[in-house]
Amino acid sequence: MNKILSSMVIAFILTGCASMNSIIDNNRETEPDIDMSTIPSGIFTYYDDPAQYHLPVEYFLIGKFVTQDDCLLFEKDNELYTPVLPAKYTKYTKGDAQITVNKEVYNIGETGDISAQPLEKEYIGNFITEGPSHCLLDKLMKIEVRGVKLP
């Protein structure tokens, strides 16, 4: 009887530990897999988690990146937005004449099509990098990545 009771207690303890580890793992935030030395600074970026399921981006907006008051902004239909770019796929240094998102190169001030969607601040989550606070407008534009092949 003692052997059965001991076995049950051990099984209960092990099951409890396994359940606790599972709970902890599920609630832990994903750490960005980004080499911080290669990401842009001075602009707002987000973490595009490769573990998330992505549909191919098939929508785009006509607009342009502009600079104003030392801020990189996105202009669409004469309205300005703070662009929020995917940190891992963006190459830009303050003062550059171009910004690269994955394999797409955009000239600052030149109108073109870009995969983007307007977004409210409450839905963006945490930024990986942040630009100056005066550059964070009430309207955000989430810039998406085209042509990324995920495992």
Image (cartoon, rainbow, N blue to C red):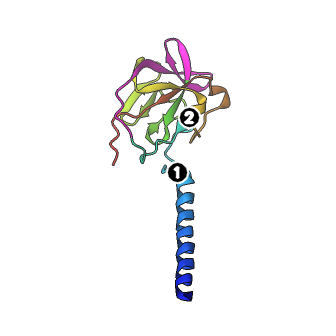
Residue 127, picture quadrant: top right
Which residue is disc 2 drawn over? 124
Magenta residue check for 79: yes
Q: Is residue 105 above or below residue 36?
A: above
Which residue is disc 1 drawn over? 30
Whole-percent x, y for residue 44 in the image: 56, 34
Left or right of 47: which side holds 42?
right
Q: Residues within 10 Å of mark 2 (few under 14, many from 20)?
A: some
What is the number of the mark on residue 137?
none
Q: Is residue 35 above or below residue 108?
A: below
Left or right of 115: which side holds 3?
right
Q: Amino acid at mark 2?
A: Ile
Q: Residue furthest top?
A: 78
Instruction: Inspect this view and state whether residue 134 appears.
Output: yes
Residue 121, picture quadrant: top right
Magenta stretch, main secondary structure class? strand
Q: Nearer the viewer, residue 121 or 132?
A: 121
Q: Residue furthest front?
A: 1
Whole-percent x, y for residue 136 in the image: 62, 28
Q: Residue at x 55, y 32 (%)?
A: 94
Q: Residue at x 42, y 48 (%)?
A: 51
Q: CA distance from mark 1 to mark 2?
A: 15 Å
Residue 1, picture quadrant: bottom right
Span shown in magenta = 54-81
Instruction: Inspect this view and state whether residue 110 appears.
Output: no
Q: Nearer the viewer, residue 115 or 3?
A: 3
